[in-house]
């Protein structure tokens, strides 16, 4: 049995995130860590380090699928891992994200009232009377509701695909994974082109 490291327990943070969000929607802001850290690490040249070592969600899917035997472990459908679906889902997901940001802006400027609603699968809305948070602007609360809805929706999709297919099927089309992969490709392409230019310069000098 391998020695456990601290990052092997990040699945606990994922579970706590959703539980705490039900009691206080402001905990939804913590989800931005899962949104920003993978991108920051990729821009730092770490590739998909976050996906491979620090993603608590993928750990949770593994635990539910492998240890708890909740996965049928069928092969992941090819179309889910195909470029068309991955890029299409990324575009759709980011469109929903920016729509959420726009709704937050409308609350910020005062043209729309705060909507205390959790939306699942971008369709099903559930009124959620959050306790009054003193000293917090409505737009901050609105963003929390929107972001928690997106995180919950992606978790539901991930658990569903985990059940019917392999535990980490979600990882094949995860929007964050797709973004970091493409950023990594561009960064490596630039490094490769720079290496070629350097070699060509050396040859001219020689």
Image (tube, helix red, strand yellow):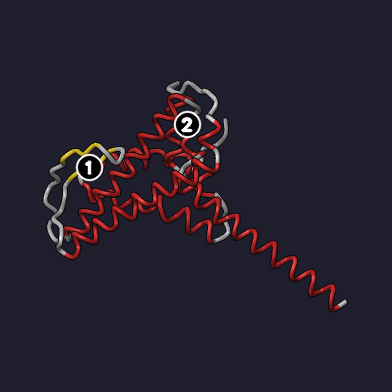
Q: Is residue 35 left or right of residue 179?
A: left
Q: Is residue 157 left or right of residue 66?
A: left
Rendered residue at 25%/42% (across/down): 20
- Image coordinates for residue 28, horizontal then vertical, percent: 28, 49
Q: Farthest residue in the right direction?
A: 206
- Image coordinates for residue 75, horizontal then vertical, percent: 55, 26
Quadrant housing the N terminus: top right
Q: Residues within 10 Å of mark 1 (few under 14, many from 20)?
A: many
Q: Is residue 163 left or right of residue 26?
A: right
Q: On residue 62, which mark appears? A: 2
- Image coordinates for residue 17, horizontal then vertical, percent: 31, 43
Mark 1 or mark 2, which has the lower sequence index? 2
Judging depth in this view, the residue of 16 and 32 nearest the camera is 32
| Residue 14 position by quadrant | top left
Quadrant housing the C terminus: bottom right
- Image coordinates for residue 34, horizontal then vertical, percent: 40, 50
The residue to which callout 1 is attached is: 118
Rendered residue at 17%/61% (across/down): 137
């Amino acid at each position: 049995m391998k020695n456990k490291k601290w990052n092997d327990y990040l699945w606990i943070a994922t579970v706590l995130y959703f539980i705490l969000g039900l009691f206080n929607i402001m905990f939804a802001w913590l989800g931005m860590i899962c949104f920003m850290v993978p991108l920051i690490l990729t821009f730092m040249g770490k590739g998909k380090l976050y996906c491979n070592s620090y993603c608590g969600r993928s750990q949770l899917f593994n635990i539910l699928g492998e240890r708890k035997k909740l996965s049928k472990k069928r092969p992941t459908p090819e179309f889910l891992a195909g470029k068309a679906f991955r890029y299409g889902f990324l575009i759709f997901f980011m469109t929903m994200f920016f729509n959420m940001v726009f709704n937050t802006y409308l609350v910020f400027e005062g043209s729309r009232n705060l909507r205390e609603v959790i939306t699942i699968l971008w369709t099903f809305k559930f009124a959620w009377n959050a306790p009054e948070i003193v000293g917090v602007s409505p737009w901050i609360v609105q963003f929390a509701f929107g972001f928690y809805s997106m995180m919950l929706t992606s978790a539901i999709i991930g658990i569903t695909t985990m059940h019917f297919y392999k535990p980490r099927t979600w990882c094949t089309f995860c929007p964050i994974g797709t973004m970091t992969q493409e950023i990594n490709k561009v960064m490596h392409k630039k490094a490769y082109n720079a290496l070629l230019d350097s070699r060509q310069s050396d040859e001219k000098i020689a």
